[in-house]
Image (cartoon, grey):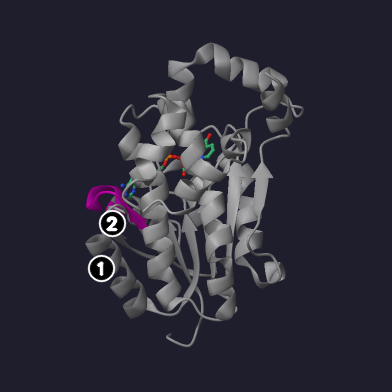
Amino acid sequence: MKSQKDLIVITGGAGGIGTACAKAFKDNHLIITDYSQEMVDEAVENLKDEGYKVSGIACDITSQDDIAKLIDFVNKSGSFKALIHTAGVSGTVKDLKKIFTIDLIATEYLVDAFYEIAQEGSVAILLSSMMAHSVEPNPEYDDALRNPQKDDSFDIVSKFTEGNSNLMYDYAKRGVQLLSVKHVGKWGQKKARIVTVSPGVIETEMALKAAEEHPERMEMIKKATPLQRNGKPEDVVGIIKFLASNQASFITGTDILVDGGVIHNIKKM
Ligand SMILES: NC(=O)c1ccc[n+]([C@@H]2O[C@H](COP(=O)([O-])OP(=O)(O)OC[C@H]3O[C@@H](n4cnc5c(N)ncnc54)[C@H](O)[C@@H]3O)[C@@H](O)[C@H]2O)c1
């Protein structure tokens, strides 16, 4: 099994987009990870019932110890092909430090840890957000977003987000895109790739929570979407499956927007 480079690791594997992604990889061996063992066990059982080759381990992605255990589990399970990193929280979480830590710092922990086991043909696919595209480039906060593990990075970004958790989410997701560019050379040395995917409003639990909080804004976004609907997890899965495949072997260090075309109208709002 070690020689078969077919392991797909999905963080947030019990979440909306993570679950939908898992279903696209019936020919691979899947490793599902999420915050709690209970969530992982349920997701793994459901997939097994549908005939998937799947195992799982809990991992709080903000814990480097947990990530080390995850990497060990991956190494023992086979040969690493793709990381699909969907774990994250939205601006409905009011603790800005938590958003910065889970969405950005932990993303770099994962990128660093998976780099160690990446090999030719491996790929890291990181979930950003269309809202990352609403944050203008700026040398001061971009440097902090690119280096989230530095002691003063959170404070620098906080000056710009002024206590607004939705803005912190947007900035952290811009940081995810900057991280992929920061690490692309290093991954390239191994002939491995790193990319981001930026969904628009995708109807998962995360989006439904945001919709409960800001129903008028969500309605406005839907109306402003050229394709006149919200996205479904399946809308994101196709591009992720493509990016994980060897057909995408020359695509790295870039971001793919999957937003029904709405970001251009949001920028004008
Ligand atoms: N749904 C959308 O509209 C939308 C839009 C843009 C971007 N995204 C991004 O896509 C990704 C997936 O979103 P989703 O809609 O599937 O969300 P979701 O809430 O359904 O799933 C997220 C998963 O992340 C897990 N998670 C949170 N904190 C964790 C931690 N510390 N350690 C391990 N796991 C943790 C949760 O348990 C959950 O299962 C997220 O990164 C999100 O920011 C989603």
Query: Image quadrant for the C terminus?
Result: top right
The residue carrying pointer 1 sits among few (fewer than 14), some (14 to 19) or many (20 or more) residues within 10 Å by Cα, namely some
Determine the residue located farthest toward the front in the rendered image.
Answer: 140
Front one among 33 and 41: 33
Q: Residue at x 32, y 37 (%)?
A: 97
**Residue 190 x, y percent position in the rendering:** 55, 80
User: What numbered label is drawn on residue 69?
Assistant: 1
**Residue 255 x, y percent position in the rendering:** 64, 52
**Residue 263 x, y percent position in the rendering:** 68, 31
Ligand 1 in which quarter:
top left
For the record, the magenta segment spans 33-41
Q: Which residue is drawn at 31% across and 38% down?
A: 98
Front one among 138 and 247: 138
Q: Which residue is drawn at 37% across and 68% down?
A: 113
1 magenta-colored: no
Q: Is residue 195 above or below residue 176?
A: below
Identified by mark 2, the residue type is: Cys
Residue position marked by numbered label 2 in the rendering:
59
On the rendered structure, is 148 left or right of 137? left
Identified by mark 1, the residue type is: Lys
Labels 1 & 2 near each other (Cβ < 8 A) = yes
Secondary structure at badge 2 equals loop
Front one among 63 and 186: 186
